[in-house]
Image (tube, rainbow, N blue to C red):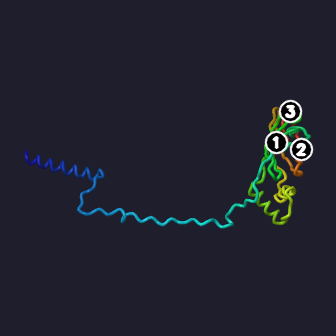
Amino acid sequence: MKLSKYIFMVLVLMFSLQASAFAGAPAPTTERPIPVEKVTPAPAPARVSQPAPETAKPLIVNSIEVSKHFTCGLGLGGSPLIGFVEKDNYGYPRTEYGLISGIGFGMTWFKGNPSQYDINAAVKSVKTRNPDISDADLPSAVRTELGVNSMTYVGLGILNAEMGTEWILSDNVRTRLGIGLPTLVSFGINFDF
């Protein structure tokens, strides 16, 4: 009986040693541990970033500023008789709002304006060809360079909705033609001050 007791104790001891080896306990060893400095490589020296070359800089000549202008006009539909238009400094309208013909108050949003990058490229091109161009002549020259003199619009009023195309005739004159409800055909011309 004593022999079976010793065998049982040896088996329990072996099982517990095996269980601790599987449980992640360190295995007994006579070797010395390897220092951490020899296991992990030394960090590489930090790279100093070089400034981007001049050609990689974005083309920024002028910033685009939006300003509010008084507008009055004639027309049928959503074209404001009296109101305001928000335009950038190159004559492209962004939004427009005011009293519209016989229907009350209306607001118009425009789509198709050139991006700031395209406008800046056109400004640079115009100023390269004509360095003495005046600030008053620059907006129309930029629009001519870009070839964008029309854009689409959507207008909503108290009792109307319309969509169509608006053309920029000059720095201060715009005209539009569209379809909508209740007027099937809407048109107008506006003078901006």
Q: Residue drawn at (18%, 50%), measured in percent from left and top?
A: 13
Q: Residue 190 carries which label?
A: 2
Q: Residue drawn at (80%, 50%), measured in percent from left and top?
A: 88
Marks 1/3: CA–CA distance: 16 Å
Q: State which quadrant residue 63 falls in.
A: bottom right
Q: Amino acid type of disc 2?
A: Asn
Q: Name the residue under label 3.
A: 103
Check if mark 1's residue and mark 2's residue have beta carbons within 8 Å: yes
Marks 1/2: CA–CA distance: 11 Å
Which x, y percent locates residue 115?
75, 54
Q: Amino acid type of disc 1?
A: Glu
Q: Name the residue under label 1.
A: 96
Q: What element carries label 1?
A: strand
User: Would you place residue 29 above or below residue 97 in this image?
Assistant: below
In the depicted view, which residue is nearer to us: 9 or 125? 125
User: Would you place residue 25 above or below residue 132 in this image?
Assistant: above
Dot 1 or dot 3: first in sequence order is 1
Which x, y percent locates residue 80?
86, 39
Q: State which quadrant residue 178 falls in.
A: top right
Q: Which mark is residue 59?
A: none
Q: Residue drawn at (87%, 44%), measured in percent from left and top?
A: 177
